[in-house]
């Protein structure tokens, strides 16, 4: 804890997560996908963005679960920890299984006049939405365990 008498500050896990380099890697990857002027491997770029998004969502879910576990004591803490651990692994598995779901291709002369083309989504299957439904369900369970 840093204190100068008037202000005090102590680092928390949430601040560490917000400074995470994964967030910036995700932003840079999406920027590359949307604003590139030269041909790139669109499929690899969107898969990298999906991977980074999955790790960010999982990290945030873990931080939220840790917060929920902190209010429990003894046997209840163990039970809640196991349940949230199982749901956390489920969220991670759901996100990572869906990484290759989106298909993206390069279209020559498909972008603005100053570009060689653009990346476009060729296919987004309906099962892709399972990731979001699963994440919201896991978050509701975490909130319910906070008493």
Image (cartoon, rainbow, N blue to C red):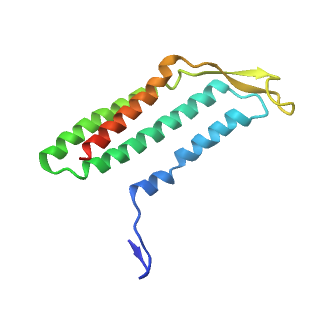
Q: Position of residue 64 (x, y in %)?
A: 36, 46
Q: Residue furthest bottom?
A: 5
Q: Nearer the viewer, residue 146 or 83?
A: 146
Q: Going 45% across and 39% down the picture, which residue do you hit?
A: 57
Judge left or right: residue 103 versus residue 119.
Answer: left
Q: Quadrant of residue 120?
A: top right
- Height in image: 81 above or below 90? below
Picture mark count:
0
Judge left or right: residue 136 versus residue 100.
Answer: left
Q: Position of residue 27 (x, y in %)?
A: 61, 42
Judge left or right: residue 145 versus residue 41.
Answer: left
- Height in image: 40 above or below 127? below
Q: Is residue 126 visible?
A: yes
Q: Position of residue 63 (x, y in %)?
A: 37, 47
Q: Quadrant of residue 97?
A: top left
Judge left or right: residue 140 versus residue 124.
Answer: left
- Height in image: 43 above or below 28? above
Q: Position of residue 139 (x, y in %)?
A: 36, 38
- Height in image: 58 above or below 132? below
Q: Going 46% across and 51% down the picture, which residue do you hit?
A: 17
Q: Is residue 92 visible?
A: no
Q: Going 23% across and 52% down the picture, which residue do you hit?
A: 71
Q: Residue furthest left?
A: 75
Q: Quadrant of the N terminus?
A: bottom left
Q: Going 50% across and 22% down the picture, which residue do you hit?
A: 128
Q: Nearer the viewer, residue 8 or 97?
A: 8
């Amino acid at each position: 804890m840093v204190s100068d008498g008037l202000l005090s500050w102590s680092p928390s896990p949430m601040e560490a997560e917000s400074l995470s380099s994964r967030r910036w890697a995700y932003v840079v990857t999406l920027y590359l996908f949307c604003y590139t002027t030269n041909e790139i491997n669109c499929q690899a770029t969107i898969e990298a963005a999906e991977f980074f998004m999955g790790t960010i969502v999982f990290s945030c879910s873990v931080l939220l679960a840790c917060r929920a576990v902190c209010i429990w004591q003894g046997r209840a803490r163990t039970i809640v920890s196991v349940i949230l651990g199982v749901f956390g692994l489920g969220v991670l598995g759901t996100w990572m299984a869906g990484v290759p779901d989106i298909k993206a291709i390069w279209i020559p002369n498909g972008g603005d006049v100053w570009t060689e083309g653009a990346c476009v989504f060729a296919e987004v299957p309906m099962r892709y939405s399972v990731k979001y439904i699963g994440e919201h369900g896991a978050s509701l369970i975490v909130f319910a365990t906070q008493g």
